[in-house]
Amino acid sequence: MNRSNLEVILKPCLCLDIGGSKIRSAVVTHDGRVVAWEQEPTCARNGAEGVFENICRVLERLLERNNLCLSQFEALSSAVAGGIDMPNGLVTQSPHLPVWRDVPLRDMLAERYLKTFLINDASAAALAEHKLGAGRGVKNLVYLTVSTGIGGGIIINDELYLGQSGCAGEIGHMCLDINGTEDVCGNVGCLETLASGTAIVRRVQAELAGGESSLLSERFKADYSALTAEDIGRAASEGDRLCQGVIRRAGEYLGIGLAGIANIFNPELIILGGGVSKLGEIFIEPARKMLFKRAFRLAGDDVRLVASFLGDNAGVTGAALYAYGCLGDGGKPSQG
C-alpha cells in the first residue's frame, strides 16, 4: 500500500505534552492538525502517582467533552520533559518532575488506554516545527523551549537527532557558571538557572525581598510566592525597570547559550518556543545580540533566530508525527 492510501485510513492520535507546569492533551490528525485539546496543571510536587492521575484526568476530559472513545485513535503518544529511555519506554529522570526515576510511563499509559509511544517534549517540538512549522524546508535546525526549564531538540540533515541513548538536546543543562546556583538537575550554573522562567522569577523575588522598588510590591503585598514569569512580563510592559532589567539579563544569558549552539551545530535556524519566549523582544533581542556577538563568525553569519510557529501545539503535534513515523516502521521507536 503506498503512503497516500495509508494516510487515508489512519485514525487520529491521542497525544500528551507533559511539562513541569502543565499537561496538554490533544487529538491530532495524521497531517498534524490539532482538532481538540484540554489542559491541566501538572502539580509536579505530587510525585509520579499524582502526576499520572492528572495525566489521566486531562485525557479523560478530552475524550468526554468531545464524545470520543479509544477505538477511534491510532495510538497514544506522549511528549515528556526529561530524559527518555525510548526502547524501554521509561522516563529515567525529569528535573521538573521531582522523584521521577525510571517511571515506566509508556506501559502505564498503554495498560490503561492504548498502544503508546514516548518521546522527549523538546525533541517532539523540533520534529513538528521541522515538518510543519517555522523549520519547513530547513535541513539543520535546533529548537529551544524556554519555560519552567530549558530543553532542546535537534534536526540534522532532515532527521531528528536523539543521540546514543535517546537523550540528546538537554541544552538547558550546559554549565555557564561553575560557581553558579544549583540546578534541579544537581549541577550548578546551568543555562536553565540563568535564563528560564524559573530563573527570572527567582531573581525578581530576591530583588524584591532585598527592598528593590517595583510595581509588583504593591500587587503582591510582600508575599511573592505566587509570582510568575507572566506577572513579571506584564509589569515590564508597564515600564517596571526592575522586571525589565531581569528579563533583559536572562535574555543575554540565553544568547550566550545560543552562541554555543551555533558554534557546535552550525544550524541554519534556531527556533525559540515555550512560555518565556512569549515575553517578546525585551527577552529575545538581548539574546539575539549576544548570539551574534559571541558566535564564531561563520556560524553566526549562517544562523537565523526565529519564534516558534506552532506555539503551544508544537509538543503534541510532534508527538503525533513521531508515533505515525513509528507505526509506519512497524511500531518500533526510531532513534537517530
Image: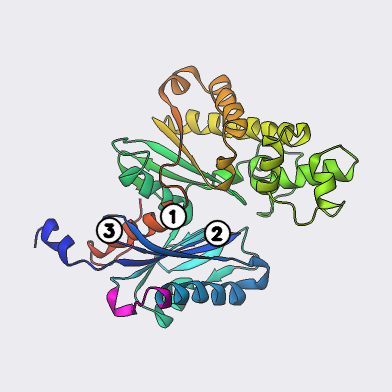
Confirm whether residue 52 shows in the render.
Answer: yes
Up-down relation of residue 300 to residue 26 (above or below): above
Place of residue 241 in the rendered image (x, y in percent of width and height, measured from the top left): 76, 31
Q: Dot 2, crowdedness within 10 Å: few (<14), some or many (≥20)?
A: many
Q: Nearer the viewer, mark 3 or mark 2?
A: 2
**Pointer 2 and pointer 1: residues touching (CB < 8 Å)?**
yes
The crowding category of the residue bearing disc 3, from other C-alpha atoms within 10 Å (few below 14, some 14 to 19, many at least 20), is: some
Residue at the bottom extreme?
A: 112
Q: Residues within 10 Å of mark 1 (few under 14, many from 20)?
A: many
Task: Determine which residue is flagged by label 2.
Answer: 19
Which tag is nearer the camera, tag 1 or tag 3? 1
- Residue type at mark 3? Gly
Q: Find the magenta span and give its range.
A: 64-72
Q: Of the numbered discs in the image, which one, if any, rests on residue 237?
A: none
Picture coordinates of residue 101, whole percent (x, y): 59, 68
- Judging depth in this view, the residue of 58 and 194 nearest the camera is 58
Work out which residue is located at the far left of the displayed protein and give it: 1
Disc 1: which residue: 315
Cα distance between the residues tagged 1 and 3 = 15 Å
Residue 40 vertical placement versus 255 (above, below): below
For label 3, the residue is 325
Q: Check whether the beta carbons of the residues at disc 1 and disc 3 lie within 8 A of each other.
A: no
Depth check: give the residue in front, 105 or 75: 75
Alpha-carbon span between mark 3 and mark 2: 23 Å
Q: Amino acid at mark 1?
A: Gly
Q: CA distance from mark 2 to mark 1?
A: 10 Å
